[in-house]
Amino acid sequence: MSEQAVEGSALGARVEAPFGRRACEVTRNLESGGYRIFSALDPSGPEPAPGQFYMLAAESGWGFEDGRPYLARAFSFADCEPEAGGLRLDFLVEAVGPGTRRLAASEAGTRLWVTGPLGRPFSPPGTLTEGASGAILVGGGIGIAPLAIWRRRLSGAGIPARVLLGFRDREHSGGLELFDCSEIRLASEDGHTGHRGYVTDLLSVMLEGDDATGAAVYACGPPAMLEAVRTLCASAGVACELAMEAPMACGFGACFGCAVPMADGTYMRLCVDGPVVRGEEIETALIPGSGH
Ligand SMILES: Cc1cc2nc3c(=O)[nH]c(=O)nc-3n(C[C@H](O)[C@H](O)[C@H](O)COP(=O)(O)OP(=O)(O)OC[C@H]3O[C@@H](n4cnc5c(N)ncnc54)[C@H](O)[C@@H]3O)c2cc1C
Ligand code: FES
């Protein structure tokens, strides 16, 4: 098996979604610190690639008295495993508004409408920088979700990954059990775990190491964190990919609600040209309306 292939599919290849949405049964919903992990059994969708996302809506109770939310919401998948009856998709959710609150409350046996997998996934280190043989994963808050499955796939392909995760405070943290590895370095702004400060402090130190240029950096988290990662990597001459967020209404290129300015002065639709983008492709990771 090649170093950058796993389970027969190329690492980093975009997986196309089947047409339309499909109903998937929620099979579990667990508390994880201040977040929740819920799983849905996808009876017919293809195996997604790490960094891709789904548009999710609960089958019932999705519209409230004031009429919102009625659009599906974007979610990275944190893990997936074939099981009897389909593919188990795991999601990490932080309840920040009506849609995420409804999904966080979805009980086993209820159903979700699922569209996906959508978007562009992470690329292996060797395709970002010639000769790069390792990865540094930097996650902030709920943005740790896509890095969990990416670490697992990199590890399966024999590519070493160092994991740096940061949280604002105890209430805004969770999901660590999605990383089935012991070597995680943690940071928290309130000091409740790990280094007191930002996760980018840990990255800054790591990028000063002699082996930094042999790695590519992958980050997902709030816009200010992504922008710090982008500028740190640019100064260190290390390639990076950022899994970004923007308000998404459709998820498949039709509404232009997710337009993000690019470094060359044009715009991309983050749902089809992202959500994973290379650091040098964008002007800034500080996207208005994104992050919470
Ligand atoms: C590609 C992608 C992957 C995502 N993955 C996850 C995930 O794995 N887990 C998770 O909990 N959330 C994830 N999100 C964010 C999630 O989609 C939003 O939090 C959700 O749409 C909010 O809906 P709501 O109805 O709960 O709140 P709303 O009332 O719509 O918004 C509540 C707050 O969230 C902010 N917000 C709304 N939509 C977005 C958005 N799309 N991106 C960023 N901020 C937003 C608003 O500014 C507001 O402060 C992802 C977003 C994208 C674009
Ligand atoms: S969310 Fe509609 S075009 Fe991107």
Image: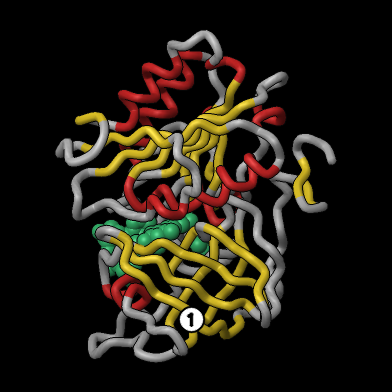
Q: Quadrant of residue 239?
A: top right
Neighbour class for label 1 at 10 Å: few (<14), some, many (≥20)? many
Mark 1 falls on what kind of element?
A: strand
31 relative to 151 in the view: left or right: left
- Vertical comparison of 266 with 47: above or below: above
Residue plotted at (54% across, 19% down): 238
Residue 130 locus on image (x, y percent) = 71, 20
Name which quarter of the figure residue 188 lies in.
top left
Q: Residue at x 78, y 43 (%)?
A: 5
Q: Which residue bears the numbered disc 1? A: 26
- Residue 227 spot, x, y in % from top left: 38, 32
Residue depicted at x 49% and y 39%: 242
Q: Give the quadrant of ligand 1.
A: bottom left
In the rendered image, is residue 281 in sight?
no
- Left or right? Give the position of 251 relative to 18: left
**Is 111 located above or below residue 219 in the figure?**
below
- Of 129 and 43, which appears nearest the observer? 43
